[in-house]
Image: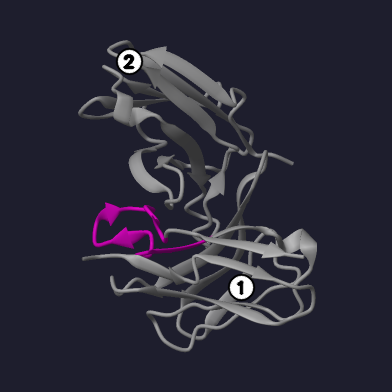
Amino acid sequence: EAQVTQNPRYLITVTGKKLTVTCSQNMNHEYMSWYRQDPGLGLRQIYYSMNVEVTDKGDVPEGYKVSRKEKRNFPLILESPSPNQTSLYFCASSLMGTEGLAVSYEQYFGPGTRLTVT
Amino acid sequence: DQQVKQNSPSLSVQEGRISILNCDYTNSMFDYFLWYKKYPAEGPTFLISISSIKDKNEDGRFTVFLNKSAKHLSLHIVPSQPGDSAVYFCAAIGSNFGNEKLTFGTGTRLTIIP
């Protein structure tokens, strides 16, 4: 089954304790991205990766790190979490925009990770 | 600066009637638009999309309309079913931006009343 998986699904941690949220996709997608969802703000992009070893900042990258050592994995790292990073996080992947003559920007999302930082 | 706006946080519709969800955007460089549906405790799932070269795209009960001059799009669901109750996000992308980034609206919670 084609899917994006995230772990953990729920996490409660304390300020300053480093954590990693893993993301993996089995669709051989080049593009992967992390979003956070907050009430009244929709989904905002944190970081994205166009391919292995190629990552770049999204709209809200402060306090986060990512790495893309393999095509299928795109972990999100919070080196020193703070309470304002309490949020619902989604990983997503997609093929690059064009495939032959077809244009598709559909992104597939993981189930989400609800993070609480106290 | 909210470039994609969904001004109705919630909408209730009787089962069997038409649901119309609206979305406005400000960036004229957006040229591809998508609708996502989200159930609680799940990630968003793709519903339907439209390129800026079209003004309508239809897929079963779902139709998306695009009015480029007004920078407005809408999603029509006919007939509405209880399983359509979810949060709907509008998203936009500029194919020339070079980063495949989806810019999302804040979502509209649709409730279908049996």
Say which residue appears at 49% left-offset and 37% top-offset.
B90
- The span from disc 2 to disc 1 (Cα, nearest Å) is 46 Å
Point out residue B84 in the picture as x, y percentages from the top left corner. 34, 29
Q: How is the image coloured?
A: one colour
Which residue position is annotated with label 2?
A: B114
Q: Which residues are magenta?
A: A90-110
Task: Please name whichever residue, B41 or A101, is drawn nearer the observer in this view of the structure.
Answer: B41
Q: Chain of mark 2?
A: B
Say which residue appears at 67% left-offset and 43% top-offset.
A41
Point out residue B8 in the picture as x, y percentages from the top left corner. 59, 22
Answer whether residue A118 is magenta in the image.
no
Which of the 4 image quarters holds residue B71?
top right
Are the residues tagged 2 and 1 within 8 Å (C-beta)?
no
Which residue position is annotated with label 1?
A: A56
Point out residue A35 in the picture as x, y percentages from the top left corner. 57, 59
Q: Is residue A26 visible in this depiction of the protein?
A: yes
Q: Secondary structure at mark 1?
A: strand
Considering only vertical position in the picture, is B10 above or below A17?
above
Considering only vertical position in the picture, is A33 above or below B61?
below
Considering only vertical position in the picture, is A113 above or below B60?
below
Q: Quadrant of the C terminus of chain A?
A: bottom right
Q: Quadrant of the N terminus of chain A?
A: bottom left
Considering only vertical position in the picture, is B50 above or below B69?
below
Task: Please name whichever residue, B42 or B90, is drawn nearer the observer in this view of the structure.
Answer: B42
Q: Is residue B68 visible in this depiction of the protein?
A: no
Residue B77 as seen in the image, left or right of residue A100: right
| Amino acid beneath label 2 | Pro
Which of the 4 image quarters holds residue B59?
top left
Q: Secondary structure at mark 2?
A: loop
| Amino acid beneath label 1 | Asp
